Structures are given as structure tokens and as C-alpha cells.
Image (cartoon, grey):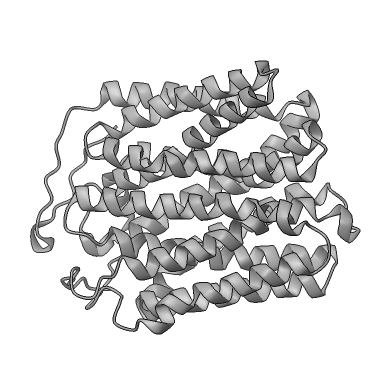
Amino acid sequence: MKANPLSLDVGNSTFVPVASLSLFALASGYLMSLVPLALESHGLSTDLAAWLASIYYFGLLVGALLSANVVSRLGHRSALIMFLTVIAITVAVMAIFINKPVWLFARFVAGIAVAGVFVVIESWLLMADTEKARSKRLGLYMASLYGGTAFGQLGIGFFGVEGTLPFALIVAMMALATLPPLLKRQSQPKDVSHSPIKLKELKTLPLAAFIGCIVSGLLMGVVYGLLPLELGRRFSNSDQIGTLMSVVILGGMMVQPLVSWLNARFAKRLLMAMFSLIGGLAIAMIEVATHPVGMVISLFILGAATFALYPIAITLACQSINRNQIVAATELMLLSYSIGSVIGPALAKGWVVQTNDLMGYFGIGFAVTFGYMLVAWLRTPAVVVQPKPIAEVEHVKVDI
């Protein structure tokens, strides 16, 4: 597809995608913990949890391959409405048909649609004129996503995991999330034309960005898919599990303003190394914590470190590309994240079978990432990439 100039400022609403995202995140946060915790009460084996997480993220991977074309054909606004509607339908199907094949298929389709939501909203917000503006908008995006997800976890304590009520509430919230783009028609970026990133141009994207997104998937897929079960093993009260999961994701939300500020001022590889080190320290704190307050603080820091990696990696990827390739770049980064998310739960499940310690999986992930990002930062020359007008953008290799 031939690239045309983008008119980024006219009609490029920040409110619409963020408002829609916040409602989506509330529903998604509740659903993420509901799925593994509701298995037993619905007569399904808890061993299904890892498979549901993996197939969901496999759907995310497939969706990452398809989403840019959908956005190109429908536009950001219509694509967002469609993806949210599909997710609501999959949740309703799970509430009506309680059996393993239906749930696996529903989570696969939901993963495809969720990938679409992420590509639409990320590219919508990243279509800004400067790297500073992009970092600020992406920080708002991540804070809304993780804030909504954190508060959504509290639904476990308020509404429980049994019966159809939790699923009905999630469907209702997904429906509400479609209202901002439905009601405000002139809200998406205008005159949008998207250019794919050619295979020969992949080398212009920093390898550290791909690695950061893959590691983020390896860790976050396990946070959503298996951490509720690990907390359930340590704490039998379901109210405690929902609260502790909300603490993890609240840590991810609270760190986003700091990530946004640091992103515009420091080398991104160094930032990913720093947050990986912090994540490793959080794991050590969890393993030695003997008091509930210590556990809460440790989980908060774990969430902050885990959820910081993706926004840093994606801004690194968009640092030196043509603006009309932002949708394609976010699609590639989401694809990398999805690959990690598909593999993560299966790897973690195997690790737990061998060691009976999920936290060791996180510790190894953070340690390896810290080592790679530190070496990548030391080997990368200090290059400042100045944004250029679209017509003048050239792809410059700035990474190892």
C-alpha cells in the first residue's frame, strides 16, 4: 500500500480511545482472574487454566497478524467498535456453554479481538508529532489499561466467580466501552494511510524492542494466567486473591507516569535493564516475606517492573520510523508480545511441575533480560534520533 501523508492533529481525539480503553480494562481485569478461578465452580478442571491462557495468547498472536489490515479497511473508530463487540459475544458464549472445547474456542477468538483493540488504541494514540507527545500519550494509555485492570480484579471480591452474574457484568462493561467511539464520530485520526514494514526494513527496528516485547509477554501471560492460582495456593480466601492481583496491576498502573517521564529522557535499553533488576529484587522480597504488608509491597513492585517493559519497548520501536508505519510497528510489537504470551504459561507450568515455585520463573526471566539489556545499552552508540517530516523520514539502523 502506498503511503500518503497523515493529518495527525485534526480529529485525533485522546478522550475517545482512553475512555473506551478504561471500560474495556475494567471488564478485562475481572475476566482475566475470573477465568482460572471459575473453573472449579463450573465443573471444569483447574489444569485447564494454563491451556486457556496459552490459547488466548495464541489468538492474540493471530490477531496481531490481522489487525492492521482491519484498521486500514474500517478506520480506527469502526474497528474498535467491532473488536469490542466480538469480545462481548465470546464472554456471553462462555456463560451459556460450560464445556472445555467451547471455552477454549471462545478464548482463542477473544484473543484475536483483544489484539485488535490493542493495535487500534496504541496506534491511535501514537500518531503524535513528537516522541515526547508519544511517550505522554502511551503513558496515559498504559495507566488507563492497568488502572482499569487493577480495579477490575476487585470484582472477584464483590461479585465472586460463581454463576452467570460475573459474565453478564463483563458483557455489560464491554458494551459500554463501545459507546465513546459510537457517540463521537469525528474522533479518529483523519486521512490515515498505513504502510506495511517490508521484510528488508525489519533490520531498522531495534532488536531490543522485539526482545523487550517478547519478555513482557513471557511474564505478563503468566501474571494473568497462573499468578491467581499461585496466590490461591498461598492464600485460600478468594477475596485476598482478587485484592493481591489488583495490587500487582495497580503497581503496573502507578509506574506508568514515571515510565513516561523516563522514556523521554533516558536510553530505553538502560530503562528495561533497570526495571528488570527491580523485578528480580521484588521476586527475592516475595520469597522471604513473612508479613502480609511485605507481600503486598513486593507484589506491587513486581507489577511495576513487569508492566514497565512493554511501553518502553514499543516507544523504542517507534523511535525512528515513518509515522504512517506506526500501525505496522505496533502490530509487529504486539506479535512479539503475543509469541512470548503463548509460550509463557506453558513454560511456567513446566517450571512449576518441576520446582513447585512460580516465582523462580519470574526471577530467571528478569535476570536474563537484565543481562541482555545492559549489554545492548553498553554496545549501542548514543544516537539522538530527531523526528522528521513524513516525506523526509529515512530508516536508520541505530541498534545492535
Q: How many marks?
A: 0
Q: Would residue 213 be visible to someone looking at this image?
A: no
Give me the residue at 27% from left, 50% from top. Answer: 136
In which image quadrant can residue 282 be found? top right
Q: Would residue 26 be visible to someone looking at this image?
A: yes
Q: Is residue 122 above or below residue 169?
A: above
Residue 128 image offset from top left, x and y in percent? 22, 59
Of 103 and 397, nearer the camera is 103
Q: In screen coordinates, is 121 left or right of 298?
A: left
Q: In screen coordinates, is 194 left or right of 225?
A: left
- Most extreme residue toward the right is 43
Residue 212 image offset from top left, x and y in percent? 43, 38
Q: In screen coordinates, is 62 left or right of 395?
A: right
In which image quadrant can residue 398 be found? top left
Q: Is residue 203 above or below residue 262?
A: below
In which image quadrant can residue 94 be found? bottom right
Where, quadrant-wise, is the C terminus in this rendering? top left
Residue 144 image offset from top left, x and y in percent? 44, 55
Give me the residue at 36% from left, 36% from top. Answer: 208
Q: Is residue 30 above or below residue 190?
A: above
Residue 23 image offset from top left, x and y in percent? 51, 65
Give me the residue at 49% from left, 76% from top. Answer: 178
Give me the residue at 28% from left, 48% from top. Answer: 135
Q: Is residue 123 above or below residue 140?
A: below
